[in-house]
Amino acid sequence: MKYSKDHIRRAMRLYAVTDRAWLREGETLAGVCARALDGGATFLQLREKDLAPGRIEAEARELQALCAARGVPFVVNDSVEIALASGADGVHVGQSDIHGRDIRAIIGPDRILGISAGTVEQAIAAEKAGADYIGVGAVFPTGTKKDAKPMPMDLLRAICAAVTIPVVAIGGINKGNILTLAGSGVDGAAVVSAIFAAEDPGAAAAELAALAERMAAHG
C-alpha cells in the first residue's frame, strides 16, 4: 500500500519501535504489537538487531500483515533487503547506511524511507536523498543506545525548521516527559520501552497517543 505524505505525517504521532527483550513468558512480538496498535500506535518499526536475518524476515511478514489490516505503516530497521523480501511498507536507515547507496532508488518511489539525523546538515541531506520522514534523537537519556547524548532542544527545533518532511523524536520518551517536546516542531514521538516494557502495552499506547496529540497540538 502506498501511503500519502499527509498520512505519513499523521502516522508519526505515536511511532512504536519493537524490542523483544521486554517480552514476558508466553508473549509473542506480534501479540504485543497487536495490542499496541489497537491501543493507539500509529506507526510500527521492526528493530531486532540480535535476531538472525531469517527470523527477522519471518517477524516482518507477520507484523506487516498486522499493520496492513489496521492501515498502519510498517517499516524494517536497517535492512533494505528484508524490507523488500517481506513486503514491508518501507525501511528506516541510519547515516552509515546511506553512504554510497541510493536507498530511494533501491526501494522505489512507493515505499516509505525514514532516515535518522542528528544535525541540521544531516536532516537536509536526508530530505534531498528522498526521505519521507526523519528520526531525530536521542532527545532524552535512553537505555536503548547507551552512548547517545541527549539532544539540546534548540537543535531539535532547528532540525524541524530546516526540512519540509515530518520529524519524529526518539530516545527516552515516556509519558512523563513527552509533553516537554511541545513547541519543538516534531510531528510525533517514537517510543520503545514506554510501550514494550509496560505491563499493559495497549493501555500504555492509548495514554501515550493522547499525550502525543496534546504535544503536537502545541506545535
Image: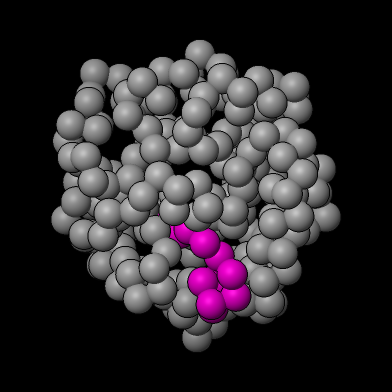
168 above or below 199? above
Q: Quadrant of residue 160?
A: top right
In the image, 174: left or right of 136? Answer: right
Residue at image position (61%, 34%) is: 137
173 above or below 148? below
Number of numbered discs overlaid on the protein picture: 0
Decide if residue 159 is in sight here: yes
Q: Quadrant of residue 169?
A: top right
Which quarter of the rendered picture does the N terminus lie within? bottom left
Residue at image position (51%, 24%) is: 163
Q: Residue furthest top?
A: 121
Q: Position of residue 182 (x, y in %)?
A: 77, 42
Q: Is residue 89 magenta?
A: no
Q: Give the magenta-colored segment's residue range.
A: 35-46
Q: Position of residue 37 (x, y in %)?
A: 51, 71
Which quarter of the rendered picture does the C terminus lie within? top right
> Foreground: 182 or 197?
182
Instruction: State the scheme by which the image is colored.
Output: one colour
In the image, 207: left or right of 4? Answer: right
> Foreground: 136 or 108?
108
Q: Residue furthest bottom?
A: 26
Residue at image position (18%, 40%) is: 108
Q: Position of residue 55 (x, y in %)?
A: 28, 64
Residue at image position (73%, 49%) is: 217
Q: Position of residue 67 (x, y in %)?
A: 38, 69
Decide if residue 78 is in sight here: no
